Image (tube, helix red, strand yellow):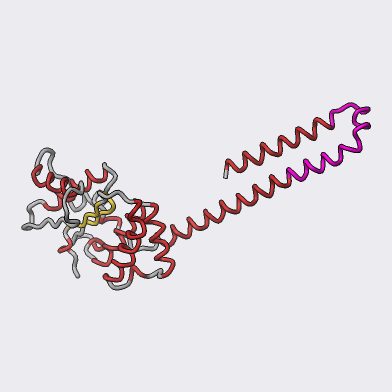
Amino acid sequence: MISNIMDLTDGIQTELMSVREKQERNLIRRHAEALGTPDEVVRCYRRINSHLKRFMFNANLCIWESIDQQATDGLIGKLSFATSAMYNSAEASDVKRGPCTPETRQDELNKLREWGSGSQSYNVYWLNGMAGTGKTTLAYSLCSELDQSHVLGASFFCSRTIPECRNVKYILPSVAYQLASFSTSFRYALSQVLKLDRIVHHRLLKNQFESLIVKPLVEAKHTLPSEIVVVIDAPDECEN
């Protein structure tokens, strides 16, 4: 928009300088060229008018793009996004969610890193074990590393102590919301889904998964890094 204004200003200034030069001619020369001057002034006017029309056209395009962006933000903003479920949310300290102690659990972390790099043939890494064995700290450490490498697509850490983190209906909308923040192409594809069904995040989980995750990912897959990872921790802590 700023460049459009600058172009308009430059164009009008050029035409004004042309008109001003004619006004500054001496009276004798001005009288001699009187017959030709009006035509040139009209041409200047037409060029200025053309600049204004082009500016208005570009301004309207900017307005429509802004409106479309606001509409997209509005659609995605209505998803049931559980902010406290992100690995590094403000509530993380309240539930004592944090990384592994430095230089510990390296064997387990290396396995996760190797899988996250895409060197393995399987797309899902299921980490299981007895309660209290540090699965959440491993997941947190993995999220932190992936985030620093800009390949963490989304995270959802379930927790019995936080209402929105123990409700399974928040998982898929939250993952979709974060993926939309991670990728512009995913964001656009998701907005197209939400335009057709604005309450899809209230439907059955299988419908949510297909509409909020699968369809946008298929549309955006060619623009996403191959190492993008989504981390979901402790789904057994969900009440339903």
Question: Measured from the top left, where is residue 56 in percent x and y?
Answer: 65, 50
Magenta highlight range = 23-48
Q: Is residue 20 left or right of residue 88?
A: right
Residue most extreme to the left: 130
Residue 26: horizontal and vertical position, in percent? 89, 26
Toward the bottom, the furthest residue is 204
What's the residue at 27%, 54% (across, down)? 154
In the rendered image, residue 107, in percent from the top left (x then y), is placed at: 8, 44
Q: Tell me if residue 24 is in the magenta stretch.
A: yes
Work out whether 161 lies above or below 94: below
Quarter of the image holding residue 202?
A: bottom left
Determine whether 231 is above or below 209 in the image. above
Residue at left offset 30%, top offset 68%: 208
Location of the C terminus by quadrant is bottom left
Q: Residue at x 39, y 60 (%)?
A: 189
**179 and 116: which is toward the camera:** 116
Would residue 109 appear left or right of 25 to someone viewing this image? left
Toward the viewer: 36 or 158? 36
Q: Is residue 74 above or below residue 43?
A: below
Q: Position of residue 35 (x, y in %)?
A: 91, 38
Q: Is residue 228 magenta?
A: no
Q: Is residue 49 above or below residue 34?
A: below
- Judge left or right: residue 150 versus residue 118: right
